[in-house]
Structure formats: C-alpha cells, structure tokens
Amino acid sequence: MNVSFTPIPRRTLLRGLGVSLALPWLEAMGPFRAWAEEAPAAKPNLVPNRMAFLYVPNGVNMADWTPGEDGQDFHLTPILQPLEKVKSKLLVLSGLTADGARAYKDGGGDHARALSAFLTGARPYKTDGLDIRNGISVDQVAAARIGDQTRLPSLEIGTEHGAMAGNCDSGYSCVYSSTMSWRSSTQPLPKEVHPKLVFERLFAAGHDPSRGQRDARRKSILDFVQEDAQSLENRLARQDVRKLDEYFSSIRDLELRIERAEKLPPVAVPNDPPPTEIPAVYEEHLRLMADLMVLAFQADVTRVCSFVLANEGSNKSYAFIDVPEGHHDLSHHGGDGGKQAKLRTINLFHVRQLAYLLERLDQIQEGDGTLLDHAMIAYGSGIHDGNAHNHEDLPILLAGGGCGTIHSGRHLRYPRETPISNLWLSMLDRVEVSLEKLGDSTGALPDLT
C-alpha cells in the first residue's frame, strides 16, 4: 500500500497579528522512508547542529575542578558533581590556554583580556578610548557562514549590563570586560540581559506597530497563532501533536515567569540592587535566559548563542548561598582556605546552572536523539585561578554530541599551551564551517571523536 506523505518544511512558521512563531523539530519534517522512496531526488531535512558558549568570570578553584583520572574512567570532582546525570555527554578538557589574555608588556587588565580573548584567540588592544580593537569571535565566524539558515544569525545574552565605554580594568575599555562576541575587530556585540526583550526578539516579527496593542491586552503570543496552529495540528500524527503541545507549554511558562518577574518587588541585596524590570533573583534570571536559549535552539530560530553568566571581574555578592562577599574579592584568596571554600561554593552554583541547561536540552527529543545530542555547549572561563590571574590550563567543558561528531563521557588532557582556539576550530568544523586559522590557533583539537 502506497503512503502519501507531504513533508512539512523545516522553516514553517505559525503566523498571527504581528507574530511569527518558529516550530520545533517534528517527525513530519523527515527523514521519512516512504517519502525518500517516492521522491529520491528530494533530500530529507537533516537535524541541525547548534553551538553555544557559556562564560563564568574570575576563574575557578581548580583543585576541586580537575578530575584526577583521564579518559572514560574519570570521576566527577566536587564542583562538577551536579553534572552526574549528563556525565556520559560531557567532555572535561584540560590544558587549554588563552594566550591573548596574558599581560606581556601591557601590564594589568587580565579580566578585560580574559573575556575579550576567550572566543577570539586575539590580543585586545589596550585602550579606554574609542580605538578598541580585538579579533572576530568564533560564534560570529559561525553566524557569518550559517546564519542565513535561521531567522537570527546568532543570539548574545547575559545577566549583567556592561558599559560600552570608559575605563573598567587597568586602562582597558569597559567593553572588553563585558563583551564576549565580536563581529569584527572593531565591532563588539552587546549582550541582551532582559528576558522579555530576548523573548520578543525570538518570536516577534521584527518592527511591529501592533506590539503595544498586544501588550495592552496582555495576550499570550500563542493566542495570535492559534488558528494557524490548529490547522497544522490537523495534519500531524499524535506524537508530533504531543511534541507541539509541550513546546507551546514551554513558551507559555516562560511568558508567565517573565510577567511574574516584572510584577514582583525587588529583593533587597546588600550593595547590589537588581536592574529595573529584570528578575531580582539571580538564579531565576539565569534559568530564564537558559530556557530562552533552549527555545531558540528547539525552534531553530538560531543555531549560535553566547551566554555570559556574569561579566569578567564581577564582584557580585552571593549572599543567597551564604557567600556575602564579592566574587572578585574572593578570587584574590591569597591561599586562604576559607576564601577558597567560598569560591568553591560560587563555582558549584554556576555549574548547577549549567546542569539545569544541559538537562533541559537532554529532555527534548529530536529525530533519533535529543537536543543535547545535536548541540555543542562549551562552558568555562578565560582565567585559571583568580588569585594568580593566569590563563593556561583553563577550566573548560564541552557538552553534547555535535550530531554524532563528538565522543563524550571523557576527561581529555592536552599538552600545556594548547590554544583554546583549537577547540573553536574543531567546533566550526562540526557545523561545516572550514576555517584555516582563528586567532592564535594551530589546528583542530584532536581526539574529540
């Protein structure tokens, strides 16, 4: 019996009043055996590979970070324990270096150099004026090559505002210590820290004069695409309808959380009042942004994201986890065991947020795997130890399967001074972007597969 099947294009959008809503991956988008046999000239939609770069400031307490064993038989250290559920989809990478962050003749400014050199592999020009200069970052190399396949070439998010001018670190412009993504050597890309604005960027159809009308009526974005969604559901199998319902539920949950964050009174935090209209609770802010990134990948709105959990040199208080001191101040621990223990608590908090993101990605089925299987999530810092301000043997993790191109569940130890840019070249290869050199790279990183 012949089965008639018309695949749904991967870029199908649900449309409504000033709204276009991308769809998650559905089985109806292929691959599909009957369709391939009936139309051999047509190629089924392939599951896309995504890449994300997450940054934490001030280094980590490395004694509690680095596994003692190499290869598959490694044990998660105290800081990495929250990643137990996704250990099999995780690479711990030791020995990587950000040479562009080192002082050489430029003196102080390790924090500014650490963030700005992290994804570029370049040496930022020391200035607090308008003559800033860096290199192009790996995420923007990818965005320039594959960004035309999605609505947004890339997404830049964070939780702390950053000035784009002025002196923030020993003669370095503030832009260096608050910006990770660089479209060109002179064009930094500021991150968006407001969840509502990120949500609107993902799902609103560009400049929309009716947006104010929608906001005034406090309607969900789902209300405006309801008719289109109902028409689509009538063409889907039961499994796809369930997947679509779960996707819509995630969107609505985010809308409600953003609304609650705007309405709740700010929480009093000593010496660190929260920005206006942004979640007052740091963990909620981080998780909102993480969920937005998941949605962006799930809907294929973008395949490239950078996420700065806190600006480099951040002196944020972590009183909510019983660490009232500033993060940067504690990073200058001077070997004090008490300060190092508090640093470990902060590091553990950040890794818990990473675990939340990775588990969310791994819960979403897509084709023959999960969203995490079809992604590469890099996490780390451009500083090894905040007290020494050194930039070799960085704390770096790579999670996800990269669409079957990464053999995870291992601790890999590379020779010291291996450029972290070699990792970025390897990730670019896996999204079919061929690049001979990025910053100080010397070639693709071996042994990932």
Image (cartoon, rainbow, N blue to C red):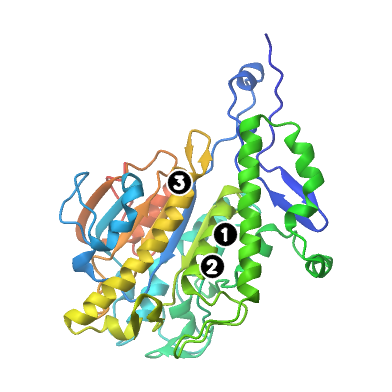
* CA distance separating discs 3 and 1: 15 Å
Task: Give the quadrant of the N terminus.
Answer: top right
Q: Which mark is residue 157?
A: 2
Q: Residue at x 17, y 83 (%)?
A: 336
Q: Earlier in the sequence, mark 3 or mark 1?
A: 1
Q: In this figure, which residue is indicated by the disc labeled 1?
A: 292
Q: In this figure, which residue is indicated by the disc labeled 3?
A: 362
> Amino acid type of disc 3?
Asp
SS at mark 1 in the image: helix
SS at mark 2 in the image: strand
Q: Picture coordinates of residue 323 (x, y %)?
A: 33, 80
Q: Residue at x 34, y 79 (%)?
A: 322
* CA distance separating discs 1 and 2: 10 Å
Q: Residues within 10 Å of mark 2 (few under 14, many from 20)?
A: many
Q: Earlier in the sequence, mark 3 or mark 2?
A: 2
* CA distance separating discs 3 and 2: 21 Å
> Amino acid type of disc 2?
Ile
